[in-house]
Image (cartoon, rainbow, N blue to C red):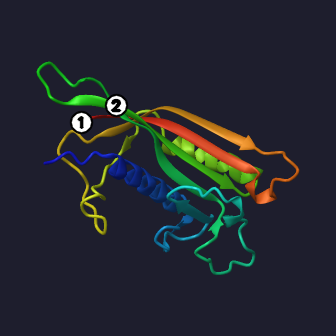
Amino acid sequence: MPNVVRDLNIVTSAAQFLATSFTDAGWLVYWQATGVSSGTATVGEVTLVPSFPNEPNVLVAPKDPVQSRTTSEIIIPAFAVEMIAEPREQQRLGLGEDLFFQRGTLQVEGFVKDRAEHFSVATLFRDWFREDASLPIYDFENTPSNPPLVNSGNEIVLFQNRALDRVEFLEKDAPPHLRYYINMEVDIFYAD
């Protein structure tokens, strides 16, 4: 089997892992790139985006009562998953092996609506991205509509060295709905 543990599959699988974790916790997940929702909103609604635009005016506060979305708006809470340090070889898996341990870094960043959500989402991230928890990798690159689980024995991706920062912006000109920022970086470790 050709190597399918590539950046696209890792990032998309991590976004899918995040979405599944949110839906299991009672959140409805809206995928901004595709316009598709999943889960049931018993807690609230969260938006997943490929990345955040440079224009902060597209990030908007949740609407009350709930109204339909526009494609140009990103309703918070919203999160993006990106690879910020591409995988690099660390060491051989074993003597005479052509497989290497690889290490890279994923970033999950986003905005939440208030201090309570700031604390609760940070706690959820700590629970979901525990040290040595594994990330299932799916082959989105070759089969995007119905990706199979990559399972050739070497594709176990572990989380290590998680760092989570919660930032509250206090500038007077910052919109209130962009006041609470969360940034988590987690190393991923796998054999390839």
Determine the secondary structure under disc 1. loop
Asked whether, in this view, residue 190 is left or right of residue 129, the answer is left
Q: Nearer the viewer, residue 25 or 114?
A: 114
Q: Position of residue 88 (x, y in %)?
A: 34, 31
Q: Amino acid at mark 1?
A: Asp
In the displayed orientation, state which residue is furthest to the right. 172
Q: Residue at x 61, y 72 (%)?
A: 72
Q: CA distance from mark 2 to mark 1?
A: 10 Å
Label annotation for residue 192: 1
**CB within 8 Å, label 2 to label 1:** no
Q: Amino acid at mark 2?
A: Arg
Q: Is residue 179 above or below residue 106?
A: below
Label annotation for residue 88: 2
Asked whether, in this view, residue 115 is left or right of residue 43, the answer is right
Q: Residue at x 68, y 55 (%)?
A: 112
Asked whether, in this view, residue 93 is left or right of residue 76, the answer is left
Quadrant for the C terminus, please.
Answer: top left
In the displayed orientation, state which residue is furthest to the bottom. 68
Alpha-carbon neighbours of circle 2 within 10 Å: few (<14), some, or many (≥20)? few
Q: Residue at x 53, y 60 (%)?
A: 49
The image quarter in which residue 90 lies = top left
